[in-house]
Image: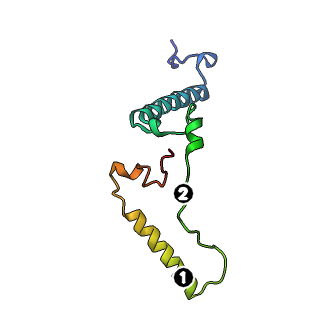
Amino acid sequence: MSSAPNYLPRFRRPPRFVLALGAALVVAVCMTCISIYIYVRSGVANIDLSRPGYEAVRKDVKTVDNSQAFSSSGPLDVKTVDQFNTLYTAQSKDLHSFDDFSKDVINNDNLNMPLSQ
C-alpha cells in the first residue's frame, strides 16, 4: 500500500480562479440586494426624482442659487481676504443653523427647492 495522499486528479478539481470569481459574484449580488433594501426601506426611493415616471416633476423643479461664488484667481490682498471671510462666515452660519439629526434638514425650504404651483 502506498502512503500517498488521496487527492482528486488535477482535471477534476475546480480551479481556484473560478471559485474566487463565483464567490465575488455572490458577494456582489448580496451587497446589491442589501443596498436596494436599504434604499427602499429608508424612504429615499420616495423622494428620488431620477426614477422613471417623474419626468414631469423634474421639469417643474426650480433651483434657486443664493450663494455667491468666490473667484479663484486674482490679486491676494486684504480686501480679497475680507471678502472671502465674509462669504465664508455667511455660509458657515447657514450650515450650522440646521440640526444634524432632524428630518427638517431635507425639507424643501431648507434645500432651497420651493414647490412649484
Mark 2 and mark 1 lie on one chain; the one further toward the N terminus is: 2
Mark 2, residue position:
64
In this view of the protein, which residue sits in the foreground, 39 or 80?
Answer: 80
The part of the image, by quadrant, that contains residue 71 is bottom right
Vertical position of residue 114 compared to residue 86: above or below: above
Vertical position of residue 104 compared to residue 12: above or below: below
Real-space Cα separation, disc 2 to disc 1, in angstroms: 26 Å
Dot 1: element: helix
Q: Position of residue 27 (x, y in %)?
A: 50, 31
Horizontal side of 52 relative to 45 (left or right) equals right
Three-letter residue code for mark 1: Val
Q: Position of residue 94 (x, y in %)?
A: 42, 65
Q: Which label sits in the foreground, 2 or 1?
A: 2
Picture residue at 46% right of the left edge, 35% below the top = 45
Numbered badge on residue 81: 1
Q: Disc count in the image?
A: 2
Dot 2: element: loop
Q: For the residue carrying disc 1, how many other residues have a C-alpha within 10 Å: few (<14), some (14-19), or many (20+)?
A: few
Q: Position of residue 76 (x, y in %)?
A: 61, 84
Toward the front, the furthest residue is 117
Three-letter residue code for mark 2: Val
Vertical position of residue 84 compared to residue 1: above or below: below
Picture residue at 42% right of the left edge, 55% below the top = 110
Q: For the residue carrying disc 2, how many other residues have a C-alpha within 10 Å: few (<14), some (14-19), or many (20+)?
A: few
